[in-house]
Image (tube, rainbow, N blue to C red):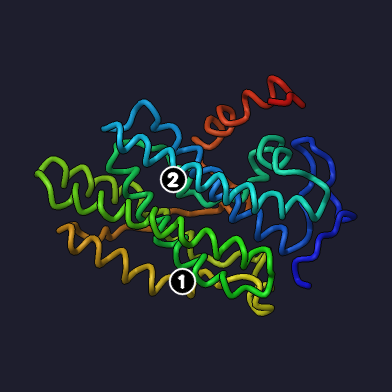
Amino acid sequence: MIGSSRADEPGTSEEGSATLSTSPVAAYALALGDDALILGQRLIEWVTHAPELEEEVALANISLDLLGQARTLLTYAGSFDGRDEDALAYRRAPEQFRCVHLVERPNGDFGATVARQLLFSAYQFELYDALTASADPTLAGLAGKAVKEVAYHRDHASLWTLRLGDGTKVSRGRMQDGLAAMWPYADELFAPDPATAGLVGLGAAVDPAALRPAWTRYVESVLAEATLTVPQMTPAPGGGRSGIHTPEFGALLEEMTSLHLEHPGAQW
């Protein structure tokens, strides 16, 4: 079985300096789990700040969906070296996180949040749809459930893109600005990850580059309907899969882990 756990892999320490598992399957699950975890953290920051109450509830629910995905993926990644989901979520150094830069970008204007959600959920939908056929049963099972959640996330972002883009002059400008702020980070979604590239040939992982055509068709169709322009911008450098993160990531991580680190081992 491709995804069988290995509790004797190196990296069992719970300290921030602990090494990560050398298993490619663990690395793949960790990267996908970190994407979901960090975006969920960003979205929950909108609670009490969203433009309307209904949207506050919607963003909170999307955040909870992402947290559920993260828990499954981090638990699976941790099973290879004996760590649980809390150890991976709260007791890693910043450079040990493997999320792409797009999900860690600050919320900014609501139009920027909508743009980030459109770009990422369109990618995540294609990813999980393909991953339902994974040779790894844990990843396939997670994808089968998550793709239904992500379909809603994508629809939600698409509707807001249409609402803002085809709304007033002000709302259209804010949505276009939001796209410009987030678009350079989309390229990293489709970049190969050397740590997990071998899993593609085994049928366990999905080649991210193969997801781009369907992603492009979907996103560009939404932007066209919303009377928005596809940004023509130089891609950002990336590096999140290698543990290189944006300056804002440290503050996000400090906020996310503060309660856990203040009360280590607490039972709630």
Q: Who is closer to the viewer here, 56 or 28?
A: 56
Q: Earlier in the sequence, mark 2 or mark 1?
A: 2
Is residue 261 depicted above or below 207 in this figure?
above
Contact, mark 2 vs mark 1 (Cβ under 8 Å): no
Give the amino acid type for the residue marked by disc 2 in the picture. Answer: Ile
**Quadrant in the picture for residue 144:** bottom right
State which quarter of the image contains the C terminus: top right
Secondary structure beneath disc 1? Answer: helix
In the picture as drawn, the residue positioned furthest to the top comes out as 262
Q: Who is closer to the viewer here, 235 or 37?
A: 37
Q: Which mark is residue 211?
A: 1
Q: Residue at x 68, y 20 (%)?
A: 262
Q: Who is closer to the viewer here, 13 or 192?
A: 13
Residue 203 is situated, as x and y percent measured from the top left of the image, at 65, 77
Q: Which mark is residue 62?
A: 2
As measured in the structure, the alpha-carbon distance from the residue carrying label 2 to the one carrying label 1 is 22 Å
